[in-house]
């Protein structure tokens, strides 16, 4: 199993993107972001996305060197059009502008339509918390395409996996909640499919509504579907996904899920930032966040459980482990990247 250092993987990802047609600024923004997703333990949003990004770039579904256009703007809001540019770069531009608005006015809200894949949402919340001391919430839909999740009792997909992320700054690193509203992210199924591995129980149903462990089922014709988050109470996960589709697709002026997609696969984005200094006060906020974090961590544990984990803790543990030991890849996904590197004339990185 290949193990690659974070720095080498970041440089490799950047080189692949630039060799595949991305500009220097696009490649140097998107590449490290994808590598960071691997570092945090989100292989579904990591460098395995590069072949798909470059394929979309060649097909014209992702466009290089485009502007983030302003649709409408107030002191505390900003609606934009990404013109199908690289999602991480365009979403980062929105974040930068919303930070200034939140600092000046307490709260800022922004949207993007016509945006390619925005990447790992937790990254934007990490930046907001770590670099600016802001509370954040981010969500995306699939811009009316890439339907993967059936409603409870249904056997055909109606919504995307519609992830949600929230971030809170603390003195000991941010608390970051980042999850899809389905039983798993589509990218995790894709990783399993490329690797030729089965998926765990509870992720998928086939075209007839029967439980399955076959990752390829999701990409069949007709397709299987990912189950909504929530198990026996899946209506909660699906209901949240529905609201996210509306918050992102309808509020942005983009698209919500529909029978026949009319744009490429991508994202409509909703992002909100809050400056605690403009509400109950920064000191009160910091005190209460520290208090509740410590209170929750102090909960007695049952036998076999070593510690209480909060949102973001697994990512911190993954980061420490992979910085020390390298980022591991299954052979199937790594071979796909090596083949791409060979096709583009990019030297592969040395193993850790």
Image: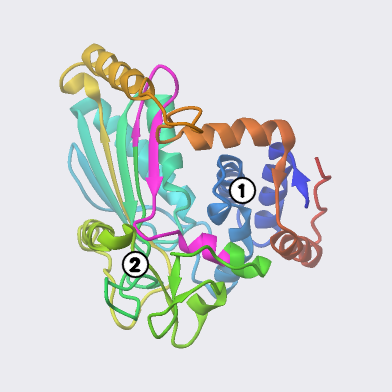
Location of residue 122 by image quarter? top left
Query: Do we see residue 53 in this rendering?
Result: no
- Mark 1 or mark 2: which comes first in sequence? 1
In the image shown, does 85 or 323 lie closer to the viewer?
Answer: 323
Query: What span is in magenta?
Result: 167-190
Query: Disc 1 marks which residue?
Result: 31
Asked if 276 appears above or below 322 in the picture, the reply is above
Contact between marks 1 and 2 (CB within 8 A): the answer is no
> Could you give the CA–CA distance between mark 1 and mark 2, rounded to whole angstroms?
23 Å
Q: Quadrant of the C terminus?
A: top right
Asked if 223 appears above or below 271 in the picture, the reply is below
Query: Disc 2 marks which residue?
Result: 143
Q: Residue furthest front?
A: 303
Q: Residues within 10 Å of mark 2 (few under 14, many from 20)?
A: many
- Side (left or right) of 37 relative to 238: right
- Side (left or right) of 324 relative to 183: right
x then y, percent, for residue 38? 60, 46
Q: Residues within 10 Å of mark 1 (few under 14, many from 20)?
A: many
- Side (left or right) of 243 relative to 47: left
Tell me which residue sits at (44%, 35%) in the image.
312
**SS for tag 2?**
loop
Query: Do we see residue 247 in this rendering?
Result: yes
**SS for tag 1?**
helix
Tell me which residue sits at (50%, 83%) in the image.
220
x then y, percent, for residue 223? 45, 82
In the image shown, does 272 or 222 lie closer to the viewer?
Answer: 222
The count of marks equals 2
């Amino acid at each position: 199993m290949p193990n690659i250092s974070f720095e080498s993987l970041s440089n490799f990802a950047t080189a692949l993107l630039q060799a595949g047609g991305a500009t220097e600024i696009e490649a140097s923004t998107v590449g490290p972001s994808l590598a960071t997703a691997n570092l945090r333990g989100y292989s579904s949003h990591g460098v395995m996305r590069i072949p798909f990004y470059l394929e979309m770039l060649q097909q014209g579904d992702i466009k290089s060197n485009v502007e983030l256009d302003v649709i409408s703007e107030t002191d505390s809001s900003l609606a934009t059009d990404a013109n199908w540019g690289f999602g991480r770069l365009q979403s980062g531009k929105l974040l930068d502008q919303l930070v200034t608005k939140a600092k000046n006015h307490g709260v800022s809200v922004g949207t993007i339509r016509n945006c390619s894949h925005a990447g790992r949402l937790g990254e934007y919340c990490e930046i907001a918390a770590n670099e600016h001391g802001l509370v954040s919430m981010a969500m995306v839909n699939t811009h009316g395409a890439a339907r993967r999740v059936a409603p409870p009792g249904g056997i055909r997909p109606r919504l995307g996996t519609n992830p949600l992320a929230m971030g809170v700054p603390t003195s000991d690193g941010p608390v970051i909640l980042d999850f899809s509203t389905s039983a798993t992210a589509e990218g995790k199924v894709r990783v399993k499919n490329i690797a030729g591995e089965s998926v765990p129980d509870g992720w998928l149903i086939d075209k007839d509504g029967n439980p399955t462990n076959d990752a390829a089922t999701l990409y069949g014709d007709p397709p299987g579907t990912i189950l909504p988050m929530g198990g026996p109470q899946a209506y909660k996960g699906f209901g949240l996904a529905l609201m996210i589709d509306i918050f992102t697709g309808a509020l942005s002026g983009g698209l919500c899920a529909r029978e026949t997609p009319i744009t490429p696969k991508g994202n409509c984005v909703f992002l909100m930032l809050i400056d605690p200094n403009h509400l109950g006060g920064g000191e009160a906020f910091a005190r209460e966040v520290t208090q509740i974090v410590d209170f929750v961590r102090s909960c007695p544990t049952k036998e076999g459980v070593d510690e209480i984990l909060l949102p973001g803790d697994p990512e911190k543990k993954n980061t420490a482990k992979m910085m020390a030991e390298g980022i591991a890849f299954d052979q199937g996904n790594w071979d796909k990247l090596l083949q791409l590197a060979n096709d583009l004339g990019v030297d592969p990185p040395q193993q850790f």
